Image (cartoon, grey):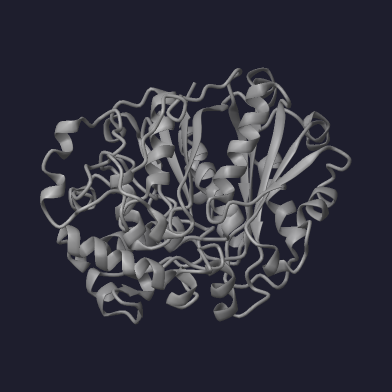
């Protein structure tokens, strides 16, 4: 049994405040053969620098940058080692220093964490975080095998070289332990794909019914195609800065109040039973009868210790007492409907065993208590892995700036990406939003980051 020491649970702190000042992205597609990776990253950077109402010209911004972070999940896709060096040169930042980060599906979140550490320590004061994935140079089957290599190849690979198969087993276990009907999971797919319908950046939008999801083709029992994330091509850029630099760049910076990481064993079978790590809104009384039913251990096969650790640290760092009450919007890593409902519990939206209540209560919807994945999430909008965690934070950043409509409602943005703005378009700008959270998640829970963004 794992037992934490006081040092393990030390709450991180920034020596200097860290701000988000601009974000940009491409749209996301199954295939993007007309543009190479360098061009996609340039598109995203140009949007960040030229379309976020910055107070400086692009060349002046370039002269302010002093460190760069690059986010790419797998060299396999682009068949280019040190791809970050190529992107760095192409974006005009050579000879500044840079590093490339890789932590599986959490690569985007980990990259922002790395950039935040550089700013918070004083090492740098203006840091672009550039993320991308090139997933269209190989077949879907080969791409799935590449992605599946981020799980333990000595254990999970025997289940079929596909993450849907890994999460299908989790879904079966979770449903057995908590008596959750498939209809509950289907609601998540319906919600997220509909929100993607209102985004010009999205890859797999659509208006579906619960029955459409249930009747859809099974990928790995019980998960249907509509319950699984997309394989995407695209790029995203988030620019971080210290306070002085942030206000030189923009009048509306957003504070990165906290960003923290957690991890767990790559091999799921190595995850040992331990006492539940309690979040600020939980007590021992919360779980006094928890192990009397079908659930015999924690985190077991249906919870993510990495998510619990990351949210525990971030909540305490940011002063979050109750996430549903204290947050105004949330982006989860909904790679599959089951991972979404698991995350509801891991980050304390409901106690373990009761995650279904969050989606069934209506709180997860626009105009609900905690609107979740208004971007469309991974299921509806994108999973260009190296860009994903960055994409999530950009969506929250724009929401907190009250600029969601600027980037989503403008017909010219839709036209830019070869799309037509729907006649039944819906404005998803959260009213009076002050604080948002983004969860960036890897593999079967090997790495997770939790970021809290806040209006100053």
Q: Is residue 189 left or right of residue 66?
A: left
Q: Position of residue 208 (x, y in %)?
A: 31, 69
Q: Position of residue 51 (x, y in %)?
A: 65, 41
Q: Is residue 79 left or right of residue 141?
A: right
Q: Residue furthest front?
A: 1
Q: Residue furthest right?
A: 95
Seen in the picture, residue 33 relative to 334 is either above or below; the reply is below
Residue 173 position by quadrant:
bottom left
Q: Is residue 24 left or right of residue 42?
A: left
Question: In front here: 222 or 128?
Answer: 222
In the image, what residue occupies the spot 34% across and 75% down?
A: 224
Seen in the picture, residue 122 relative to 179 is either above or below; the reply is above
Residue 239 position by quadrant:
top right
The mark total stands at 0
Quadrant (top left/top right/bottom left/bottom right) for the N terminus: top left
In the image, what residue occupies the spot 14% across and 61% down?
A: 179
Question: In front here: 117 or 176?
Answer: 176
Q: Is residue 363 left or right of residue 131?
A: left
Seen in the picture, residue 405 relative to 283 is either above or below; the reply is below
In the image, what residue occupies the spot 49% across and 67% down?
A: 230
Asked if residue 43 shows in the view, the reply is: yes
Seen in the picture, residue 203 relative to 390 is either above or below; the reply is below
Q: Position of residue 241 (x, y in %)?
A: 66, 28
Q: Position of residue 6 (x, y in %)?
A: 42, 24
Asked if residue 412 shows in the view, the reply is: no
């Amino acid at each position: 049994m794992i037992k934490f020491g006081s040092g393990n649970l030390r709450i991180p702190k920034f020596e200097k405040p860290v701000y988000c000042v601009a974000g940009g992205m491409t749209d996301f597609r199954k295939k993007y053969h007309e543009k190479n990776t360098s061009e996609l990253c340039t598109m995203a950077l140009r949007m960040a620098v030229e379309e976020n109402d910055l107070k400086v010209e692009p060349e002046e911004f370039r002269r302010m940058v002093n460190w760069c972070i690059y986010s790419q999940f797998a060299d396999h896709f682009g068949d280019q080692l040190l791809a970050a060096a190529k992107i760095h040169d192409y974006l005009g930042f050579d000879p500044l220093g840079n590093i490339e980060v890789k932590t599986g599906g959490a690569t985007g979140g980990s990259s922002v964490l790395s950039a935040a550490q550089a700013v918070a320590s004083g090492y740098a004061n203006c840091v672009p975080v550039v993320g991308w994935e090139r997933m269209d140079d190989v077949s879907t089957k080969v791409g799935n095998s590449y992605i599946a290599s981020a799980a333990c190849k000595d254990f999970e690979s025997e289940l079929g070289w596909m993450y849907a198969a890994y999460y299908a087993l989790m879904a079966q276990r979770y449903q057995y332990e908590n008596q959750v009907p498939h209809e509950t999971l289907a609601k998540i797919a319906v919600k997220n794909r509909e929100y993607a319908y209102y985004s010009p950046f999205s890859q797999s939008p659509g208006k579906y019914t619960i029955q459409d999801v249930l009747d859809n083709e099974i990928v790995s029992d019980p998960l249907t195609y509509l319950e699984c994330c997309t394989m995407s091509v695209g790029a995203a850029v988030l620019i971080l800065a210290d306070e002085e630099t942030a206000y030189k760049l923009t009048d509306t910076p957003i504070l990165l109040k906290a960003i923290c990481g957690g991890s767990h064993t790559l091999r799921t079978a190595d995850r040992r039973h331990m006492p539940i790590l309690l979040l600020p809104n939980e007590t021992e009384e919360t779980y006094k009868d928890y192990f009397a039913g079908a659930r015999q251990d924690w985190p077991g096969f249906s919870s993510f210790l990495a998510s619990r650790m990351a949210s525990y640290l971030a909540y305490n760092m940011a002063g979050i007492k109750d996430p549903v009450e204290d947050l105004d919007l949330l982006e989860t890593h909904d790679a599959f409907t089951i991972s979404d409902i698991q995350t509801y519990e891991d980050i304390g939206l409901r106690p373990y065993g009761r995650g279904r209540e969050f989606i069934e209560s209506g709180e997860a919807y626009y105009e609900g208590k905690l609107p979740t994945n208004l971007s469309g999430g991974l299921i509806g909008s994108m999973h260009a892995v190296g860009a994903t965690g960055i994409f999530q934070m950009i969506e929250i950043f724009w929401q907190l700036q009250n600029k969601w409509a600027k980037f989503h409602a403008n017909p010219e943005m839709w036209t830019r990406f070869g799309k037509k703005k729907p006649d039944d378009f819906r404005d998803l700008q959260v009213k009076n939003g002050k604080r948002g959270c983004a969860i960036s998640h890897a593999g079967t829970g090997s790495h997770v980051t939790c970021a809290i963004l806040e209006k100053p």
